[in-house]
Image (tube, rainbow, N blue to C red):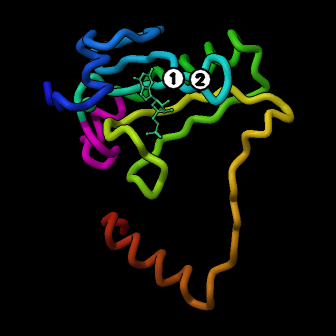
Amino acid sequence: MPRDPNCIFCKIVAGEIPTQKVFETDCGLAFLDIGPLADGHLLWIPKEHYETLHEMAGERVGSLCAPLPQLGEAVKNVTAAAGYNVLQNNGRVAGQVVNHVHFHIIPRAEGDGLGYRWPAREYAQGRAEELTERLRSALGST
Ligand code: 5GP
Ligand code: ZN
């Protein structure tokens, strides 16, 4: 199983660092975030070490993500949240601090003040079409 001896989440998987584990499958582990944005803030991680989502094979991501609805529902019900965010950061610039793939499941309440900046803008003339073409090509879309 891929593992990084210096990775904090690999150490959690190996039981070398204590944590509040709430759920596991063959490939994934859920535990409470040590610095929660709200009570019940969970982390869902692959047991194997991958730094970013795109390093994982699609089938592996599929198996890993299968319990996400169950985890979201449990967090929502147990914390009586009005909703929740599933957040997955890739790369330092995107807010990733721990370099082991993880999904945050964050309970949300009205007026919790969490939010995020979402400064939506408009595409310049022709840019959306150009990007669509390039992305379709990168993805092998027909
Ligand atoms: P990131 O910013 O990389 O998306 O999020 C990393 C998350 O891991 C943070 O929310 C942080 O609180 C959490 N975290 C970091 N170290 C530990 C730890 O040792 N135990 C637990 N349970 N969570 C951790
Ligand atoms: Zn790791």
**Quarter of the picture holding the C terminus:** bottom left
Question: Which mark, by number, is residue 81?
Answer: none
Secondary element type, mark 2: loop
Question: Which mark, by number, is residue 41?
Answer: 2
Vertical order, 101 against 68 (above or below):
below
Q: Position of residue 29 (x, y in %)?
A: 37, 17
Q: In this rendering, would 139 be left or right of 126?
A: left
Q: In this rendering, would 79 be left or right of 60?
A: right
Vertical order, 123 against 20 (above or below):
below
Give yes or no for residue 48 being in the magenta stretch. no
Respond yes or no on whether mark 2 lies under 8 Å from ligand 1. Answer: yes
Respond yes or no on whether mark 1 lies under 8 Å from ligand 1. Answer: yes
Quickly name the residue at label 1: 33
Q: Nearer the viewer, residue 41 or 141?
A: 41
Residue at the farthest left position: 1
Bounds of the magenta segment: 50-63
Name which quarter of the figure residue 113 lies in: top right
- Name the residue at 39% across, 77% down: 134
Name which quarter of the figure residue 50 lies in: top left
